Amino acid sequence: MNYDNWKLSNPIDDGHGTSMVSSCCGDEIMYEVPTCTECGSFEIGEKWAGDEGWTICDNCRAIEQGYDYLDICSKCECECNEIEDYEYEQIQKENYEESMRDEY
């Protein structure tokens, strides 16, 4: 593929495809992870005693306080936006070029 066609091509149509990554680290996104509303921990478990079950946060020990479902980065475990992998690579390239300009 010549340079002009490459510049005009759509990243999805160039045969490589794209995937969604986190905007912070470029790593995989974990979708709808249960998160404690009290302390923000991801370590939520269920405890059973006979027929009854409780949702308990393993970090703050809150019982049945509720939890949110968040999309988080699997590397830094922060709530992140998702972007396409080629966008993340372009941002990283621009950041690198800017830091190299700042050094000189």
Image (tube, grey):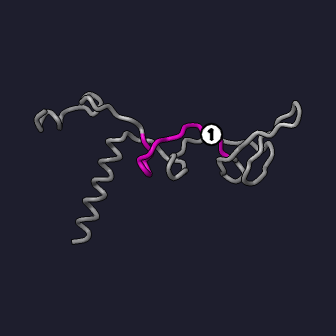
Q: Amino acid at mark 1?
A: Tyr
Q: Residues within 10 Å of mark 1 (few under 14, many from 20)?
A: few
Q: How many labels, in total?
A: 1
Location of residue 94 in the rendering, given as x and y in whole percent from the top left corner: 28, 54
Name the secondary structure under disc 1: strand
Q: Is residue 25 above or below residue 19?
A: below
**Quarter that holds the N terminus:** top left
Q: Left or right of 7: which side holds 43?
A: right
- Corner quadrant of residue 53: top right
Location of residue 83 in the rendering, given as x and y in whole percent from the top left corner: 40, 41
Q: Which stretch appears magenta?
A: 21-35
Asked if the magenta segment contains residue 92, the reply would be no
Considering the whole magenta stretch, tell me its main secondary structure.
strand
Location of residue 99 in the rendering, given as x and y in whole percent from the top left corner: 28, 64
Identify the residue at image location x=26%, y=27%: 13
Provide the residue designation for mark 1: 69
